[in-house]
Amino acid sequence: MDWNLAAYVLRSKNRPDVLNILKIPQSPTQVSKKLKISLTHASKTIRELSSKKLIKCLNEKDKLGRIYEITKEGKEILDYVNKVKV
């Protein structure tokens, strides 16, 4: 496991929540509604997690209605975060 990524996820309230929600593939709009955060904040968090390869876009060619899901590495880090999160 990449401990730097685990620490990165733990430093935020929304990152673990977004990873949890994306166990089931969803769009940024769905994530923002479920977490009750702005679409801008949800999109930013998704972009950050995607750049770290913790989630992936399932339909990259589409400009609208992109669907994201957690990656294998993202699941591994999320399992750890869920165990230690207070």
Image: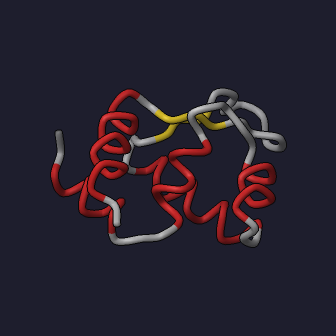
Image quadrant holding the C terminus, namely: bottom left
Q: Residue at x 38, y 39 (%)?
A: 74
Q: Residue at x 27, y 45 (%)?
A: 80
Q: Which quadrant of the structure image shows residue 53?
A: top left
Could you tell me how many numbered marks the image carries? 0
Q: Residue at x 46, y 52 (%)?
A: 49
x, y percentage for residue 68? 63, 37
Image quadrant holding the N terminus, namely: top left
Considering depth in this image, is 34 or 2 the residue closer to the camera?
34
Q: Is residue 86 above or below residue 6?
A: below
Q: Is residue 74 above or below residue 43?
A: above
x, y percentage for residue 45? 55, 62
Q: Residue at x 18, y 45 (%)?
A: 2
Considering depth in this image, is 35 or 41 the residue closer to the camera?
35
Considering depth in this image, is 36 or 67 the residue closer to the camera?
36
Q: Is residue 56 above or below residue 47?
A: above
Q: Which quadrant of the structure image shows residue 44?
A: bottom right
x, y percentage for residue 41? 65, 71
